[in-house]
Every structure is written in C-alpha cells, then in structure tokens.
Amino acid sequence: MQRIYQEDSKAVWHPLAIETVWRSFAVCDGHHRVLPDGRCDIILRFPSDGLKPSGAIAVRIAGPSTRFHLVPVSAGTAFVGVRLRPGMAGGVLALDPGLIVDRVLMDDEAMTVLPALAELCRPAASIDALAERLGLFVAGRFRMQHVDPLTTAMIDMLHVTGGRLPIAELAKLHNMDVRTARRRITAATGLGPKQLAAIIQFHRALRLRYAGIGSANAAIEAGYADQAHMSRTFRQMGGIGSARLPELALADLTP
Amino acid sequence: MGGMKLGYTIIYVADVLATIDFYERAFGLKRRFVHESNLYAELNTGETVLAFAGEPMAEMNGLAIRPNRTGDIAPGFEIALVTNDPQAAYERAVGAGANGLAPPAEKPWGQIVAYVRDIDGCLIEICSPVAG
C-alpha cells in the first residue's frame, strides 16, 4: 500500500457546504493520481508521523479540475482536505470558481485570495484536530445567501441522473431557459453544465467498473455511446488505460 | 371509504411476452395470467401483483408515458424482490440478461442488497429479508 486514504462523510460540520473531510498519508514515495471531480477543495499539507503534524502546515486551494493530474508525494507527507459540495465554493471562498479551473493555488497565492486561511496553518496537536479545524472553518465561513437554491437543485439533479440529463431538459424541469441555466451552473461550479455532466458521468462509470460491472454493461448504464467511447473518456479524464483498473482511493468511489 | 391497499404494480413495456419470459428466467417468478392480446400479463408475486402492460395500452388508457428503455436513465422507482440468497439470485438475473449495476453488498442495517436493470431498463432490487 502506497498511502492511506480515509474519508469522513458524516459531514457533521456543515452538510450543505461540505461533502467530506478527507485525509491521506503517504507511506512511501510516489504519486497521487487525482481525478477530476468538478469540486473545490481546501487542502492542508504537512510532514507527519501519520498521527500528528511534525512540521509546518501549508495550505492550498484546489479548483475544479477537468482532467487528472499526478501529485508527487514523499513518504511521511500527510494531507487533510475539505471537499466542498458542488456549487458551494463561492459561498465559502468568496471566489469565482471559474477563475481557478484546473488550478491549484499554493501558499501565498491562496493566502492572497483568502487571508483567513492563515488560521488553518497554526500548529495542531493531531491530524484529527486539523480535520476538525478545517470543517469548522468552512462551516463558519459559509454564507447561505451566496447560494442559489434553484441552481443547487439543478446541480443536484445532474448528479442524480448520473450526468445524463441534457441541459435543455434540466432547464425545462426548473422553468428556466437554457442560457440562464447554463450561466447559473457555470457561475456556481466554474464549469459549464456539459463539462460538469461529463465529469459526473465519468465518475459513475468508474464506480460501476469498480463494483465489478463489465465494461460493456458499464458503458451502457453510464450512458456512453459504446465501450470505445468510455475507454477514451477513462484515458482522457483519468489517465486510466482500459487493460487494468489502477488501485484508486478517491472521492466519489465510495458511495 | 375503507383504507386503500396496494393491489397492482403495472409497468408499461415494449413487449409484454418478452418481459414476462425474462422475469421467469431471471427471477424464477411464474406467470399467472396472460391476456390473449399479449398486451397484459401478471406474475405470481404473492399478495401484490406485478403486472406488465404493452405500451399501446397507455394510449388506450388516455395516458402519455416516457417508455422504459435500457439506454435511457433509469426511471425513478424500483421493484424490490426478496430472497434468502441474493448472491445466487443476482448471478441468475445477470445470466438471464439483466444489466448488473451493483453486486450484493451489506447495507448498514444488515440487509444484503443488489441492483440490476431488467430488459426494459427498470431498476430491480434483489434483497434479503429485513431482519427482525
């Protein structure tokens, strides 16, 4: 095992804003494959023995990604992150997520955008304490008025339908014209509805494959034209070849 | 007026005979009635009848429906079939042409649950009885 990854999906801190508080600890040198999930994360990175920080805590903001990337990690590096629910980043970061698509704001850059992040980097007695600090930070900053319930409903419906509902239908079901729906979803998530839907569809297909469903059936169920279409998407979005599924410990693969 | 009771679940399908044939092979259920028009059939499912009606019946009934299709997003309901051996039932269903979505897994409340889609694209839950 290359790393230990855990999620706390109880989201006791703020169920509307927080999808999960996750933590990861690298046992040996290697790369983390981070799949695109269309969400924003606030991440703390620090050297650790697996239980507590043993050095400086650095902070970063990961914007919504549309393609996979590999993060090099060295043994003894720990991460604690809070993954914001889709569409909730603006309400927490006071930032247009569209400006940080496929970007990770490191230390100073992150602090400039959100000076309050500095309080997350204070020394901590344990990784548990850091996880709690992150959760409370988000809960304390979240402002409901930054979130449009109708937009949230549309984003939720995209998730419920596995990313398969066409935007025209989605808009109609919410008594909205397509342009308005597209603008609102893009403003809330930083991604166009088509792009967001493609990411959701990709994750669902991956989940089906990891549940042991065959490639042909997974492709049909996930709504791809055929197996080749699904394989292409796995390669492009996840860097995952069709021959063998890599060992992944990630977001959205746990129900 | 007395209380209502759930008497029938009726699913509109493209080909009633193909569907009941599939249900017999996939889930071991037996047909108990097939109308001579082949537009309506019932399965022997105990107190609540699971029945299938041909899509033309929807129009005859003055309805408009979104037809159930395997290529579409699953409709937002499921039929739950209870068995003491969900693993064997799941394998049998998939072997008969059901599209497996989730092999049997234990839920937090102790029930074993699997999901497949039938040949019309409807969601079928295959589950163990709820304990207690």
Image: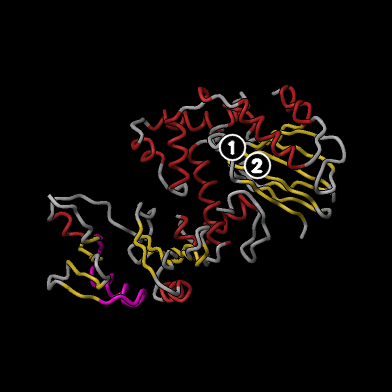
Coordinates of residue B65 in the picture (x, y in percent): 24, 51
Name the image quarter holding residue A84.
top right
- Relative placement, left or right, of B81 versus A187 is left
- Which label sits on residue A18? 1
Q: Residue A147, percent across and down?
A: 50, 27
Q: Chain of mark 1?
A: A
| Magenta range | B10-30
Please, is residue B103 above or below residue A207 in the view?
below
Does B46 appear above or below A74?
A: below
Q: Image check: A107 left or right of A189?
A: right
Q: Residue furthest front?
A: B132
Rendered view: A181 above or below A253: above
Chain designation of label 2: A
* Closer-to-camera residue (A217/A115): A115
Amino acid type indicated by mark 2 = Val
- Tags 2 and 1 in contact by the CB under 8 Å rule? yes
On whether residue B126 falls in the magenta region, the answer is: no
Checking the image for residue A201, the label placed there is: none
- Dot 1 falls on a residue whose secondary structure is strand
Q: Which residue is mark 2?
A: A21
